[in-house]
Amino acid sequence: MIGEIIAIGDELTSGRIINTTSGFAARQLFAAGHEIVAMHTIGDTPALIGEALKRAIRRADFVIVTGGLGATSDDLTNEAVSKALNRPPTLHRGILNKIRARLRGGTGDQALLEKLAWLPQGAEVLNAESRMAGYLLVDDATPIFFLPGVPAQMKELMVEHVLPCLAGWSTDKRHHFRQRVYRTFGLGENMINEYLRHMEKTPQLKIGYYPVDSEVHVSLTVTGRDAGEADALFAEADSTITALLGGFLYGCDQETLASVVGSLLLQQNRWLGVAESCTGGLLAGKITETAGSSQWFAGGVVAYSNFLKEQLLDVDSSLLAEHGAVSAPVARAMAEGIQRRAGVEVAIGVTGIAGPSGGTDKKPVGTVFFGLCIGSTVTDQQYTFSGNRREIQEISAQTALDLVRRAL
Amino acid sequence: MIGEIIAIGDELTSGRIINTTSGFAARQLFAAGHEIVAMHTIGDTPALIGEALKRAIRRADFVIVTGGLGATSDDLTNEAVSKALNRPPTLHRGILNKIRARLRGGTGDQALLEKLAWLPQGAEVLNAESRMAGYLLVDDATPIFFLPGVPAQMKELMVEHVLPCLAGWSTDKRHHFRQRVYRTFGLGENMINEYLRHMEKTPQLKIGYYPVDSEVHVSLTVTGRDAGEADALFAEADSTITALLGGFLYGCDQETLASVVGSLLLQQNRWLGVAESCTGGLLAGKITETAGSSQWFAGGVVAYSNFLKEQLLDVDSSLLAEHGAVSAPVARAMAEGIQRRAGVEVAIGVTGIAGPSGGTDKKPVGTVFFGLCIGSTVTDQQYTFSGNRREIQEISAQTALDLVRRAL
């Protein structure tokens, strides 16, 4: 189906916040076989919102509208929709009761929050359980999905409600889709494109390349005339991609480097400890973001100062004096220190120069050393990354996880 | 002036690339006192490009168009503009000569590259020196700027050519703008809206409310007929907002909780150490994301296991047995442990249940204890947060920073 996306909010048109939700929606819809022909970003001005909406309904098979559904006075989407589509605000008792139940004993202006319960006539609430409910409106046989602008809420609704609804809506029942996202680390987008480009010639295969922070994700969408054809094409393409990406492919779909490392450690009944300098907690943060990580992650030390490297990781002061804090021997000593202190079998140490200052001719900004202990085996690696401070920290933390993954 | 922005490219409407250039342009224009009422992203389809362009010219005082100016077959902006505005392609000899000079001895399809020299009639090249020249077209007295879609080139042209040109262009000399963003933590968007809503009645003030992760940012835009009026209105609104937000206001514009904590520590010549359990490195990560944090942050321990709490933070095993790892006495002991081990004056300990499992009736998921040491004074706080695992970790890390900020 052909769609348009409208994002609403002065915070977007003033450039204060970069609109990431429209791109996310477009990517998901594209992968599901839909085509987005235009995306609009409109400020909090009801007349312009209404105009954009009416024009999109005329042109597209479906419309996604994000933002402006909240309770504050600058949230004007519902008002604009009511006026533009001639659908007076209607009270949704279910939402109202939920708001009242939540407010009981709490603070907040009841009248303000009850604004959330008034939706344009005909609105079907998508997720009654959520604090901010998205809704579906069908106008002129065109489904219009209204979603919150908060990225996390919008993305959840998009994946769990909008895509299944559109899949059922589609009159194009002739096609069967199979999809998978391949997550890679360590290989550039152009290189992956070269490896896989020959597959793009097969008309039933659609391949997308998406850099996500320091990773590249590859999406495969297979279209078959029936389930059997789709399954067969998918199996073949899947094994080709898996073979071509090799060790750079660390997981599929929702897996992360940390979750894959965790699965390997659990299988092998081993525990992990980390000693961080330049990543400053980001590595531990990536690990503990994973639910259940307390089953395989003992903890770590963020040894930003030399004093803490000596004090908590037993790094010898002579080592620091001789080689400097950013060096292979110190990275190894950090890993050995946390391995011993935390009583774990697997340990990694990271020390480097994230910038913006601190670089030298011999060790420019981006120089990072890794020390890895697996049992009694200690190894080290040196990398030179480019990017700003946060990018260097990000790729360093990812590299640490990838080194552990490959060693396991 | 009132403007619209049009970004062109299938890579944007398919979500393969997130559009960051429109947001950049909007932010620059907003800061220069212009108002962007709508931004559009259109695929490489000449008819849709032309339609969007004509509509924007009717509505806006100026238009920015980015993308589709290159030499490959999917670059269709010039073709669309020629047709929509009835301005036949015209050869620019200067550009042609530059391309030929560059091609001499080089590779590349000459015919393809010479496509760059054909611009819609009336186009004034903005930067003849560059490889891909942006241009200005004036239609119906409306300036339209055509810029390359490559972010670095677009941004350079925006700052060096578009903004100065618009500043000279503007016939609307009547308005002067003043702006500020107020960053708050600990107060809901609705509550802030209630505090400030009375100010929205003043027509010269525009106030926006933006939840960003666990924070709420408030933007103030003041419009005055002259610089004096703008300054006076701004000073009054600024002091009202600052007073109403009180201790919840932690900083303005680009400041973060971590950068504000860092400034306070630097001023007082004190060092910080952190001991994390449930935030698992996220707190240290937020701190070390700040450039220069090595001047006030010694480091920390991510003590995920009880063993590490004893081993690296000297938390007494009897304390863990008696009160459990998630308790006020353990939070205090963690803070005291890192304070002593890192030799710092300011230390904070965080222990809690981020979920999804691990909660009990007495200590449900979201229960978090904080222990804070400032010199020899030790205090503790208990909070119960809601949200998923990552949201609880996020708000816990922010709360830790805010507790340090308020104590300093």
Image (tube, coloured by chain):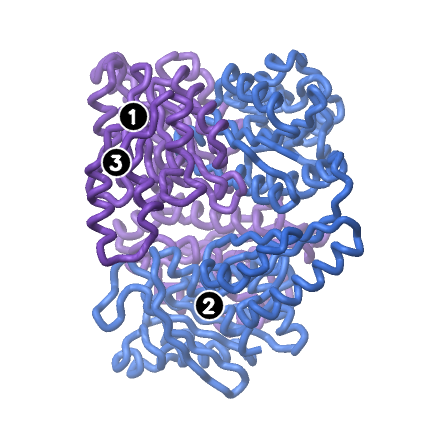
Chain colours: A blue, B purple
Q: Which residue is mark 2?
A: A399
Instruction: Classify mark 2: residues with Cα within 10 Å, few (<14), some (14-19) or many (20+).
Output: many
Q: Is residue B118 visible?
A: yes
Q: Chain of mark 1?
A: B
Q: Which quadrant holds residue B165?
A: top left
Identified by mark 1, the residue type is Gln
Give the CA separation, mark 1 to mark 3.
25 Å
The label number, if any, that marks residue B159 in the structure image: 3
Q: Residue A310: percent from the left, percent from the top?
A: 36, 76
Query: Of circles 1 and 3, which is in front?
Result: 1
Identified by mark 2, the residue type is Thr
Q: Chain of mark 3?
A: B
Q: Residue B74: percent from the left, percent from the top?
A: 45, 41
In which quadrant is the N terminus of chain A drawn? top right
Residue contact at pointers 2 and 1, CB within 8 angstroms: no
Figure check: A384 above or below A203 = below
Identified by mark 3, the residue type is Val
Q: Which residue is mark 1?
A: B121
Q: Which quadrant holds residue A182?
A: bottom right
Element marked by disc 2: helix
Residue A284 horizontal side relative to residue B339, left or right: right
Q: Earlier in the sequence, mark 1 or mark 3?
A: 1
Give the CA separation, mark 3 to mark 2.
36 Å
Element marked by disc 3: helix
Of A16 and A240, which appears nearest the observer?
A240
Q: Chain of mark 2?
A: A
Residue at the location (34% across, 82% down)?
A: A316
Instruction: Using the rendered image, report if marks 3 and 2 lie on a common chain.
Output: no
